[in-house]
Image (cartoon, rainbow, N blue to C red):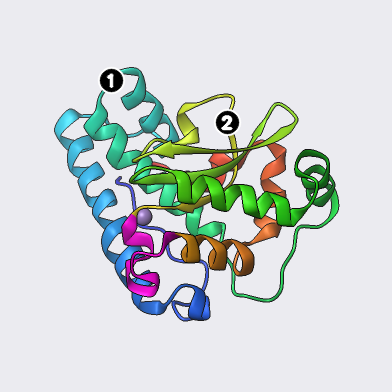
Amino acid sequence: MAYTLPDLPYAKDALGEYMSAETLTYHHDKHHNAYVVKTNELVEQKGLGGRSLSDLIRHANSKGDKGLYNQSAQIWNHSFFWLCLAPPEGQKPTGRLAEMIDADFGSTDNLLAELKKEAVGHFASGWAWLVLDGDKLKVTSLHDADTPVAYDEMKPLLTLDVWEHAYYIDYRNARPDFAEKVLGNIVNWDFVAQNLDGNGVSRADQDG
Ligand code: MN
């Protein structure tokens, strides 16, 4: 068995002007796939087959195997990221998620502003995150390939890829525009709400 590149959960042109088919072709078919290929090579070399992706990430982290950690974490991060997006249909947080956002941030607009600030302020490559820490929502970011899979106190709810490869085709160097347009228009809030059960890691996991 080997890890595989999960299909996108929508057509490549479904995210409209906010994330083009060309971006998805490069980002999913080339960048994301390269992490899958490289991880499978490393797993074979090291004889580490048969683990779920999340177990492999935690194993690499516990052994200080930075190369394997980076590659495998990027499979999971991207798999989760695609699930966080949906075609622009005016979606907003509802129900318990909306209540928690209002309690912890005051409003959805404030949360989006916090996430944008985190995404824009994050130096160099990485990922901006909305996570559940205990029963509180928290905005944070992690560098390079680092992932909530490796941290028990970070239950992943929503992420934004802020590596330059995520936005250079549609937004050139303008990370602030990318963050604002994506967060404001194509977040799959139903998926984010589902992750309030604390099982977000499982949704982008796969068998090895
Ligand atoms: Mn990426």
Q: Where residue 164 sits in the image (x, y, percent)?
A: 33, 57
| Disc 1 secondary structure class | loop
Q: Is residue 64 left or right of residue 95?
A: left
Magenta stretch? 164-175
Q: Is residue 10 above or below residue 83?
A: below
Q: Where residue 206 sits in the image (x, y, percent)?
A: 44, 45
| Disc 2 secondary structure class | loop
Q: Is residue 15 left or right of residue 50?
A: right
Mark 1 residue's CB less than 8 Å from ligand 1:
no
Q: Which mark is residue 46?
A: none
Q: Where residue 173 sits in the image (x, y, percent)?
A: 34, 64
Q: How many marks?
A: 2
Of 173 and 141, nearer the camera is 173
Q: Is residue 129 left or right of residue 54?
A: right
> Local crowd at mark 1 within 10 Å, few (<14), some, or many (≥20)?
few
**Residue at label 1?**
64
| Kind of residue at disc 1 | Gly
Question: Is residue 47 within the magenta segment?
Answer: no
**Quarter-wise, where is residue 170 in the image?**
bottom left
Q: Which mark is residue 154?
A: 2
Magenta part, dominant SS? helix
Q: Which residue does the image show at 31% across and 60% down from the upper left?
A: 165
Question: Is residue 171 within the magenta segment?
Answer: yes
Q: Return the residue found at the far left.
A: 45
Instruction: Look at the image and tell me whether residue 206 can be seen.
Output: no
Q: Is residue 88 above or below residue 154?
A: below
Q: Which residue does the image show at 30% across and 37% down from the upper left?
A: 70
Q: Where residue 141 sits in the image (x, y, percent)?
A: 49, 39
Separation of residues labelled 1 and 2 (CA atoms):
20 Å
